[in-house]
Each structure stands twice: as C-alpha cells, then as structure tokens.
Amino acid sequence: MRAHVVGFLPALGRRRRAATAAAALLPLALSGCGSESSGAPSTVAVASPSPAAGALDMALLSHLDLPTLAQAPAAAQPVAGQGAALSAAGNWGYTTAGGRRFALTGLSTGLSIVEVTDAARPRNVALIPGLDSQWREIRTYGEYAYVTTEAPSGIDIVSLKDPDHPRKIQSWNKTLRSAHSLWIDEERGLLFANGTNGRVGGMRILDIGSNPEDPSEVGAFTDFYIHDSYARGNVLFASAINDGFEALLDVTDPRRIREVTRFLTGGRFTHNSWLTRDGRYLFTTDERTGMPVEGWDVTTPTAPRKVTQFIGNPAAIAHNVLIDGDRLLISHYTEGVYLLDIRNPEQPRVIGSYDTYPGPSGGFNGVWGAYIFPASNLIVASDISGGLFVLAYTGQ
C-alpha cells in the first residue's frame, strides 16, 4: 500500500495509496465504452464502475483474474509441458468491422481473448495455448492477431475472422524461432519482429500484407539488439535496450535498412517508444527504477531534442507508452496506468490514473501492458499477477 502524489510545477497534489512518491512534469472528445455484448458473460469480479482508492478520473468496469482467463474455452489443444506459474504479460485490443471489442492478453500459457464490447460484463471467449513463457506480446493486422514469445515456437498467427471462434493458423518459424516483441505497419503490410533469436537479436521484417496467414521474410537488420520498435512510413524508431539508445532507421527498402541517427535516453535502458500523430514528437521509456518517460522533438530527425519528462514515482518503473490521438497511456508496473493529455507535447498533464496493484511500489509487479481503444474511453490493462482490468476514463 502506498500514498501517491502527482505533482506539477508548481506542485499540485492528490493522495493515492502507503511509500510516498511524486510524479513531475518538467518543461524540457472521447466516445463511450461500448454497447450490448453477444453471449453470456463470464464470472466478473466487479460488475459496475468502481474507482480504486485515489484513482484519478478512471473507474474499474470489470476484472477477470488469471485463473478465470486461463479457464476460457480453449480454441486449440493444450500444449504439453505446461506447468509454470501463471502470469500475464503484454496486451492489445481488436475491434471488428461491426464495432465489437476484444481484449487480447498474453498469459504465460497462451493468448487470452475476452470480449469487452459490454465492458461491465466481459465475455471469456478463448485461450489459444502456447509454450510456457513469462513474455508474450500481441499485435493485430486486419482480422489476424500475431503473437510472439521468448519460447522457441515462432510467431503464432491467429484468425479473428470469426471472433467467437478464433482459430490458430500456424506457428510461423521459417526464419526465426522467437522474438521479444512485434510492431506492425498496417499501411505497408509489414511486421517487424524485434529481438529475434540469432543475428545478435536484431530485427526481421516480414511481409504480411501479401498473405497474412503465411508471411515471407523481406529484410533484416542485425547491427544491434532491438527490444521494441515503432514504424511509420519509411521511418522506424528502434529501442536498443542493451545499449541504452533510441535509433532512427530508414526502412524505405527493408532489404537495405540504413541508420540515420541514434540518441541516448535518460536511463540508458531504452525500452519502447511511440510517435505523436503529427510525427513531430517521440516518447520513450527506460525500464529502470525512477527513470522518466521522456519526450523528444524529432522534427529534425538527425538532431532529436529532449523537451519534457514524466516521473510517476521515483521508486517505481515505467514500462511502456502508447499514444491515441492526443493522449499518452503509460503502463507503469506497480503504479498501474497513467493517462496524459499531450495536446501540447512539451507540456503534458496527467488527466487520469488507476492503480491495479495493492502491494508496495517498485519492482516488476503490477501492470505490464495497457491499451486504449482508439477514440474511446475504454482501457484494458494486463496486471502480471492480477489478470485483466477493464477501465474507463471518466474525465472530460
């Protein structure tokens, strides 16, 4: 338990939950949460909006714990050799053409699929079993989910064409056995597999646009280990966690990737990044205690300039960032999730927060991943030991 203070310059405060912490921002039209769901709801811990003690303009709509997620109707046969402690990892969201919403959560035993169209009554749809691994990340392309893990199983390709009956197509392993994370450029139909086995843990680029069910490798970059990446157009930002820098790569031709520049981040443990919608600012994380989420002006690509930073709690770790429109969502391990208004990226402000983890600050507990459904107030967060939290931003 902890008391938590969010501060600005000049400082403003709010109490949250018992070690004291500070969050500082330094200068350097949302829709509802869903409609009626089809099918009977599964067991839900919370059936009506309920704020955590000290939450800022966020409410808990529902919660599914790990055992509930793991007991979903399996869409494939269980994988032999399971038995490691159950935990949650990354998560993502999927929206059908008809507007139905699904939370895709990586468990240590596979991919959990939960319908959250009616966010107060989520429906446990399926578990796509996979090899045991505490890492599991998901991205989507069209009507497909791509799932990666550090286990030597390749990339799982799951069809969501019939979201009530998802189907694993294959575990793609033609040129890789594992990857740490994925990025998908939907415009170009390219999948960037980061931290792949071999080739110093660099990046493999797969063409998924031509055949989403059976990709082909069209390029690779092997100069350094890439932990995560973000691509838009012909530019890719690569987070080199082992070397402590963010690199800007020219990926115009995936067969001939060229490094344009690199810059060190504050914690020298560069974890992930996300670009604002106008392409002028990049936000980065360093997966180390007390290290800030940093904002960079990348208008001049060869000379990125730090313009802001955010520290949720100097005793805790910021994990990932994600941007939707003018909002920055942070999954912050033991501090839960933060939502920041970045209409002025150089002076962001906290507009929402919710803490899913009841224990003390610090370490690798709490929220691993968080996803906000585009142009909505609906957030799904994966808590490592707590399962799936379905949240609503309730501010204006």
Image (tube, grey):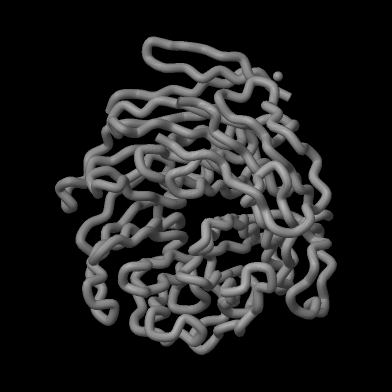
Residue under the image location 41 percent in, 67 percent down: 184
Q: Position of residue 32 (x, y in %)?
A: 53, 39
Residue under the image location 41 percent in, 17 percent down: 8
Name the quadrant of the N terminus: top right
Counting every numbered tag in the picture gives 0
Decide if residue 165 is on the left or right side of residue 32. right
Name the quadrant of the C terminus: top left
Decide if residue 39 is on the left or right side of residue 223. right
Vertically, is 362 above or below 93?
above
Residue under the image location 51 percent in, 46 percent down: 372
Q: Position of residue 343 (x, y in %)?
A: 31, 32
| Residue 365 seen in this snapshot | no
Q: Nearer the viewer, residue 150 or 110?
A: 110
Decide if residue 296 is on the left or right side of residue 378. left
Vertically, is 120 above or below 242?
above
Q: Position of residue 161 (x, y in %)?
A: 57, 74
* Residue 297 sits in quarter: top left
Residue under the image location 55 percent in, 85 percent down: 173
Vertically, is 126 above or below 47?
below
